[in-house]
Image (cartoon, grey):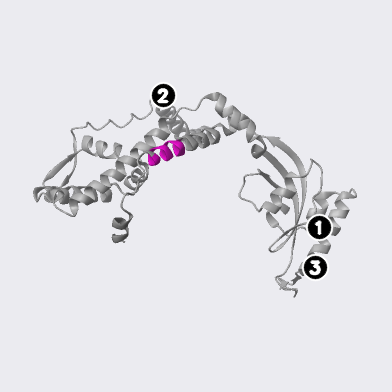
């Protein structure tokens, strides 16, 4: 008996030791790494010492796209950064910024950067009153109505000749049209649409989901013929066959659901801001539009 008890004790002791260690770690989680002070030297570039604070300032001043590049390769990015700084320093010693054509190029770059900065600032600080947002929502409510569908896809071969694909006969366009029209007739006559999907549809993605497709909206990037057919239906209706370049679609509209104002508010605000921004830019362009006094001079510049 003592031998058995000792054997059991030897088996369970390591388990309880591990359990106790885990419990102790849970009570005393590892300390978070100590933040590096801004004045700490974290690298060198040539003879120059680079501090954590300097790296942080570089990173904070970068535009979003450059921040992604920085994160992907910090060492490579900073090496390139310090090389550019060195080249700029040498150019400044030579006073290249005061020489043509560099002077004019710098002026043009400055104009472009500052004008783009102003446009972005205008866009970000433009305030759109709530009543304007809701007014546009009411005007565009149809665009924010979502249609949930089921579909049957009947493909056809290009041209008049049927093609064989994986041993299965592909229909000609005329055959596919006739089949799609027959499916419409069956569905409108009361046949189970899901069963028609399973037996006839050649779209594998929607077929796996019993024909489910969507939801779609009027302003989605879909062929106009499809959107016109779908949004002319009432829930439960079956569409006429809709021809597309490689086949016919038969749709059943399951439901129409309007998106709430809160769901599309960001889209509305962006659109209204873009309208305001265009109006402002058009006004700015008109105020400085050049009036030609000597057409012959401008013709001579061509």
- Of residues 144 and 291, the one nearer the viewer is 291
Q: CA distance from mark 1 to mark 2?
A: 61 Å
Element assignment for label 3: helix
Q: Position of residue 62 (x, y in %)?
A: 31, 41
Magenta: main secondary structure equals helix
- Residue position for label 1: 199
Residue at x 86% of width, y 51% of height: 187
- Of residues 149 and 294, the one nearer the viewer is 294
Q: CA distance from mark 3 to mark 2?
A: 74 Å
Comes first in the chain, label 3 or label 2: 2
- Of residues 126 and 156, the one nearer the viewer is 126
Q: CA distance from mark 3 to mark 1?
A: 20 Å
- Residue position for label 2: 27
- Residue position for label 3: 174
Q: Position of residue 158 (x, y in %)?
A: 70, 70
Q: What range is drawn magenta here?
A: 277-286
Judge left or right: residue 52 versus residue 127: left
Residue at x 64% of width, y 37% of height: 144
Residue at x 76% of width, y 67% of height: 173
């Amino acid at each position: 008996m003592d031998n058995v008890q000792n054997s059991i004790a030897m088996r369970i002791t390591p388990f309880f030791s591990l359990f106790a260690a885990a419990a102790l770690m849970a009570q005393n989680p590892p300390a978070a790494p100590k933040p590096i002070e801004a004045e700490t030297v974290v690298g060198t570039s040539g003879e120059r010492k680079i501090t954590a604070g300097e790296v942080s300032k570089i990173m904070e001043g970068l535009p979003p796209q450059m921040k992604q590049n920085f994160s992907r390769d910090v060492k490579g990015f900073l090496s390139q950064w310090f090389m550019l700084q060195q080249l700029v320093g040498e150019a400044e010693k030579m006073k290249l910024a005061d020489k043509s054509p560099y002077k004019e190029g710098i002026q043009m770059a400055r104009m472009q950067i500052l004008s783009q900065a102003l446009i972005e600032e205008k866009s970000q600080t433009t305030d759109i009153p709530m009543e304007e947002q809701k007014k546009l929502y009411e005007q565009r409510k149809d665009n924010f109505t979502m249609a949930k569908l089921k579909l049957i896809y009947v493909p056809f071969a290009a041209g008049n000749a049927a093609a064989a694909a994986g041993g299965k006969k592909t229909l000609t366009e005329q055959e596919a049209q006739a089949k799609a029209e027959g499916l419409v007739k069956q569905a409108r006559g009361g046949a189970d649409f899901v069963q028609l999907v399973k037996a006839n549809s050649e779209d594998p993605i929607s077929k796996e989901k019993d024909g489910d497709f969507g939801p779609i909206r009027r302003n989605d990037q879909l062929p106009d013929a499809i959107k016109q057919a779908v949004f002319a239906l009432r829930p439960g209706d079956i569409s006429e066959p809709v021809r597309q370049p490689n086949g016919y679609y038969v749709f059943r509209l399951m439901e129409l659901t309007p998106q709430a104002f809160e769901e599309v508010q960001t889209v509305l605000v962006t659109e209204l801001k873009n309208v305001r921004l265009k109006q402002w830019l058009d006004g700015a362009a008109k105020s400085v539009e050049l009036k030609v006094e000597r057409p012959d001079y401008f013709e001579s510049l061509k």
